[in-house]
Image (cartoon, helix red, strand yellow):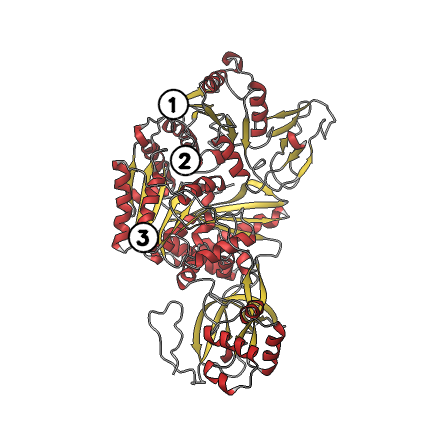
Amino acid sequence: MKEKQRTLFDDAPVEAPWEDQEESPVAVVVFGQGARGAFHYRVPEEMADAVCPGKRLEVPFGRGNRPRIGYCVDLLWQRVSGDRLKSVRRVLDERALLSPTMLKLTAWIADHYLCEWGQVLEAVVPAGVRRQAGSRWRIFVRATVAAANLENLKLTAKQRKVLEILTREDRAWDPRDLAAASGCKEGVLKNLVLRGWIRKESVRVREGKLGREVFARQAPLALTDEQRTARDAVLEVLRSGKHGTVLIQGVTGSGKTEVYIQAIQEVVSYGRQAVVLVPEISLTPQTLDRFRSRFEHVAVLHSHLTDVERARQWEWIASGGVQVVVGARSAVFAPTPHLGLIVLDEEHETSFKQDETPRYHARDVALQRAMLENVPLVLGSATPSLESWHGAQSGRYRLVKLSRRIEDRPLPAVRTIDLREPRGKRGDKGAITRRLDAAVRQALAQGGQVILLLNRRGFATHIQCARCGYVVRCPDCDIALTHHRSEATAMCHYCDYRVPAPTRCPECRFEGIHFSGLGTERLEAEIRARYPDVACLRMDADTMRSRGSHEKALEAFRRGEVRILLGTQMIAKGLDFPNVTLVGVINADTALHFPDFRAAERTFQLVTQVAGRTGRGDQGGEVWVQTFDPENPAILAAVRHDYEQFAAWELPNRRSMHYPPFAQLIRFVLHSVRQAPARLAAETLAERIRQEWANAANGEALFRLLGPAPAPLAKLRGRFRYHFLIQTSDGERLRRAIRSVLNDVRLPEEIACTVDVDPIDML
């Protein structure tokens, strides 16, 4: 009698014999694309031991029975008669790629974010792992006879030596290694294969070894009273053996990373693993160095790894040999077999939200995984998202504050420069005002370093004819092209359309074409002109394209080879450089007036975070913020380093308008190469959802539909875009209604529909 395989969500097995031919094992399979829902396939008896949830299977699909690769997500026992079910053709993986917990997690993601389960699985398992990058098939040999039977065989001395080695260790051998160990040639092995006394096996073998740098070990740092309280709060949850979420709201420079490390040290002492998520690749090298100086086995997962590197890291993690996994968003899916803790550093960052299907948020996925694994989740930030802050205020999370910097260093003084004053009155000639220029020169003269933030790429953000007013725009997107002087191009930052930068108006041929607006490339040119003897470096998406560019740039700044670091938001968070004595925000208003309910929150976070890059050393530091709106509450709160003041101002606005965290938001974007069909599809879908909600709702829950209307970016990559938003206090019921409509409605082929649950990008 053989025990019947549990289904994925069963609590207990059901007894059933293999010999009972009325029931057979049936694999439940989902596909990465092109087929909705799950499909059932009979498992041939010879594959019964190999098929299990979490492995990929090759199965016949459709009327033509063309081979397709899918994921086995469950294994059932059913009565199958005749040819009612097609059979699995091949099992592709020796070991399951996904644990039962990860299958539950991916099922939750598919349900919550309204996408297909197979799409989630394709995103969770890296392409390099699926392709087994960095490995190849090799032939091994194994004995087919037992050691006790060797005396009954007519063997030469060399043959006996080979079989004694194979039967003694009972494992597969590389033929070359076996020949060397036995002192014979490979011809002897071939003869044994012909006689049937040994057999060949094809085994997938990884080539090369995982290179690991050796770092000098560092002792734990002494904790402040506040740090000790934060660490103990995490350890209290850990020792309870139950899930709990701890939000550490610590001012910049208060030592949150050391709290994480000392909590993880206890996790590792139990033989368990920790996952640490950081929002930017630029933070990964610095964070890695910190962890590698304290832990022996630290793995890394981020998008700049090659397929081979990612596959090696993935297998190392899955083997259980890794103590800490550090990475960006996708590291939340690290295949840790002994997970003990998850940490999200800078948890407020928008880069934790995936911008393509599945459009998950790593913070919410981490919370769900921590609940499934029954482990603590730590969220850390100087400027927590209002969703997390509200969770702590309502008692769902435990809030711990770090209000002081290490060694009681003061927070930097922040001053604003009002850009509304006429430029002539200010005496300014460029992006850097006279007062900011004086502060930069003083910081440099005193041996300090300077960080300048401008969250706009390119040289000029606007190209316009001074005679006829023509604006050079992207033909495929509803936006103006950005001038990149170093490449002599005008570029679209959304679709990468490029044309040579015009020297005269394309419309009226007037030669007085005007390049206006300020980007990081123009700022760099101004800095080099103002401070010709000072080394400066620009960090943005244009200069940080090559592998290792982040590490090289930050290391040069750390060594003091670069005195002025300028760039976009990638330089605004998490970086720790004690010699930075001045931070300048060139324009704090770049995102303040976007058509986005989070615009004020993002502005507050960005200014506060970049201000925190200074004042971390003995020399102290100061911050100058240039703005056209110095009385804006977000700017005022950032100047005062006062998160609670900002939250107290912003949360009532969110509540009155039914925005998160007081309601769930789901955004639909319908797009087509033609405008009218996109508009009609948006109107039709919105009305169907409204009707479905009316049929399913009891009238108590909030339902508010805004739109449809042209999206803020009404045309993108050659497609016209219409969107609508739905606000609700009952997200589960709304998702059921939407799923029902999406399963029933068949949009025209030219229409594409994007569903974004808990959207971050509102453009």
Q: Residue at x 35, y 74 (%)?
A: 13
Write down the residue under mark 3.
269
Residue highlighted by disc 2: 601
* One can see residue 306 in this view: yes
What is the three-letter code of the residue carrying label 3?
Answer: Ser
Q: Residue 131: which quarter of the image? A: bottom right
Q: Position of residue 349 (x, y in %)?
A: 43, 41
The residue sitting at the right extreme is 509
Q: Which is more N-terminal, label 2 or label 1?
A: 2
Q: Amino acid at mark 1?
A: Gln
Earlier residue among tags 3 and 2: 3
Q: Residue at x 42, y 45 (%)?
A: 292
Question: Circle 1 is placed at which residue position?
Answer: 619
Question: In the image, what residue occupies the spot 53% across and 36% down?
Answer: 552
Compared with 487, 137 (above or below) is below
Q: In terms of secondary structure, where does tag 2 sit?
A: helix
